[in-house]
Image: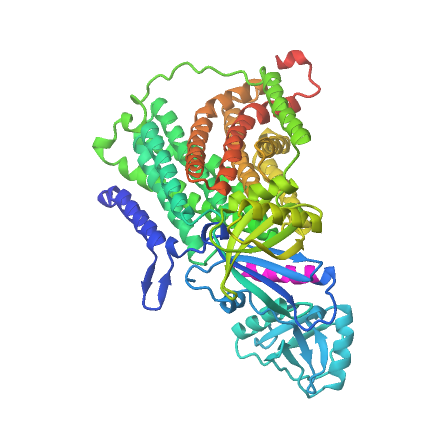
Amino acid sequence: MKKSKKATFFIVALITFALFALALFGLKIGDLEIKGSGQMRFGIDIRGGVDATFEPRDLDRMPTESELEAARAIIETRMDASNITDRDVTIDKVSGQILVRFPWKSDEADFDPQKAVTELGETAKLTFRDPDGNVVLEGTDVVRSAAQVDESGLPVVALELSGEGAEKFAEATGRLVGQPISIYMDENEISSPIVQQKIAGGKAVINNMHSFEEAVSLANKINSGALPFSLVVKNCSIISPTLGSNALRVTVIAGIAAFAAVCLFMLLYYRLLGVVACIALLLQVGGQLLALSVPQFTLTLPGIAGIILSIGMGVDANVIVSERIKEELRAGRQLRSAVEAGFHKAFSSVFDGNITVIIVAIVLIILGSGSMLSFGYTLLTGVIMNFLAGITASRLMISSLCMYKPLQKPGFFGVRKAGEKPAKERVIPFYKKKVVFFAISLAVIAVGIVFALTSGIKLDIQFQGGSILKYTYSGEIDAEQAEDVVEKVVGVTTNGQLQNNLAKDEQLLILSLANNQALTSEQQQAVTAALNEAFADNQLTLSEALTVEAFVGSRFFGNGLLGIAISFALILVYVGFRFRNIGGISAGVMAIVALLHDAFVVTAAFVIFGIPLNDQFIAAILTIIGFSINDTIVIYDRIRENERLLGRKMPIEELVDKSITQSMSRSINTNIAVLACMVIVYIFAQIYNIESIRQFALPMMFGVVSGCYSTICIAGPLWVMWKNRGKPELAKS
């Protein structure tokens, strides 16, 4: 038995390397195929994709704004259901068109417009028709449909109709008893159930399903086919990667370099524990990559942010465990006993920190779409893998290594000798210095406000809408140079992309201008003239001008704000319950104040450096919120532990100061590791001129520092002030 336990380290390590190899290269045995990272579906920025314009088919009028919004919402729902989270779906009210941009499939090699459009699902109009072909019901009359099992255990499709739809359906079924009412997608019949009796009340079922899978398929088609009109593709074209053809290679190299830097830090500082931590992180990353590649979930920039945050939490879990084991060794415990005690004491910190982040991730998945959904999914899978790797796998490996006599020396665990007397603990008076800390925060906030008022806040087209100008051209054009030319003429944030329209054998320069008002004809002429002057040999011709709504609309903001509000409320409830012995609700409130502080710092970084607010901004804010709350929970856990050990005799300000001081080593080490990752990513983005990555990494560096600062210097002192409210100042000195 002892020998088998000694071999556990090698078994876990072997499983880790095998899983990571599977995540990298995939596996194909007969009909079984597990797609690796090379077959992952990457976002538009990295791999490019498809730009398609839809317009109503055979509609003798201009579609209304509500109809266009309904069609957009349905298309977005279809794409979310297919795990296509990196997409832009916007509308042009003037022309009545819907513009859709989405990335290539992982295995797509050649451009095929029909294949690309088919991936969106049926873009047809749903109708219910009588035997004579007359439309008795439309898709918009169906509120929802669902596959169910009836009282006899047979599969059926349950329909719920709107008020108007219920009236129309009652009239039709009353006169068509014994006859079919056929369901069509455009002119394709997808079902033809027989009417058995008049159906009133707005609820009906479709029976005679051959299987439950058939019922699910029909229900999904009905739900996704409720377009207010049939859509037809006006044109399709190829989108070139905005990050450049070498973006993926550079991103991979930067990721490897960052991972190597973290591992080097862990090895140097924690030695044998660092070896275990590196293997655990490798296991976590491998599992996370498989969670993306197997279901073909689009890896977007917010998704990368979710991976970064989960890796940061993985580092944090291993740092917490390592610091706890070192504390127990210094206290004189034997190695095996120190390991068991270290994991036991670290568990609550890791558990509570991960649960709070899981709460945020689940809320984002339920309420979010697009970038929020992508972030929530990668974060959730990463946290789950962190539990498995950082706690379970690490514990098995460390316990196994402790059985080897040559490895039982305290030096291998970062301690000179067991029972060594630690240096006299110097408790830093954070509470007494609160005025200095608050002044620093207020100064940063003031600088951000001044820059916002003087320089303004730049919004990308995703946030405020604007105009899209499409130019045909010949030869070669630098898209970034074109952006600079346009911004000088109209003074608005501009994004340029190059596309190939193979259907018409032409090259396109697509310019997206963020502006809450459409460009006038004079402005369009001025832009065209400036471009032709700058690119005199490229024969630029304006082929199309579109006025589009914000890609990230009010619904997105509404869901985002609701998600954050629900997350904060659930965090308050959880913190209030888990830390009830130390006044949990008040601690939770101060943690959220610290989160708001960090969110403002990240926003200020975007404003000060003139970075337009777009998906990068959303990703950065969500990442820092998750990172900061985890940091704060760890300190609250130490406060709870110290109060249990020391009793309530110690003044709360001294208790908090002592707990923060004891946790500082862990906080600083974790933040150094994460900050090193972001610095490396930023350097690579700077060298290879990858603007999107650079615009994300720079504010993230400020956010990581702010998260550490607010946890140590803001949340704790604020909480003490709240607990001591109403007490004489003398009692707090």
Residue 475's spot in the image, x, y percent?
A: 47, 53
The answer to whether 305 is drawn above or below residue 290 in the figure is above
The answer to whether 651 is drawn above or below residue 246 in the figure is above
What is the quadrant of residue 685 in the picture? Answer: top left
| Residue 465 can be seen in this image | no
Left/right of residue 182 with respect to residue 51 in the rendered view: right
Tell which of 171 and 10 is nearer to you: 171
Query: Residue at coordinates 40% horizontally, 29% vertically from top-left?
Result: 324
Q: In the image, which residues are magenta?
A: 68-84
Tell which of 688 and 620 is nearer to you: 688
Which quadrant would the C terminus be assigned to in this image? top right
Residue 719's spot in the image, x, y percent?
A: 62, 25
| Residue 673 can be seen in this image | yes
What is the quadrant of residue 624 in the picture? Answer: top right
Tally of numbered tags: 0
Tell which of 192 and 550 is nearer to you: 550
Q: Main secondary structure of the magenta part?
A: helix
Residue 652's spot in the image, x, y percent?
A: 58, 20
Left/right of residue 408 with respect to residue 654 in the rendered view: left
Colouring of the image: rainbow
The answer to whether 667 is drawn above or below residue 51 in the figure is above
Left/right of residue 230 with respect to residue 153 in the rendered view: right
**Is 600 one of the magenta-colored residues?**
no
Which quadrant would the N terminus be assigned to in this image? top left
Tell which of 476 and 238 is nearer to you: 476
Query: Residue at coordinates 42% horizontally, 46% vertically from top-left?
Result: 247
Query: Residue at coordinates 73% horizontally, 65% vertically from top-left?
Result: 62
Residue 50's spot in the image, x, y percent?
A: 52, 59
Query: Residue at coordinates 54% horizontally, 75% vertically from top-left?
Result: 214
**Is 70 one of the magenta-colored residues?**
yes
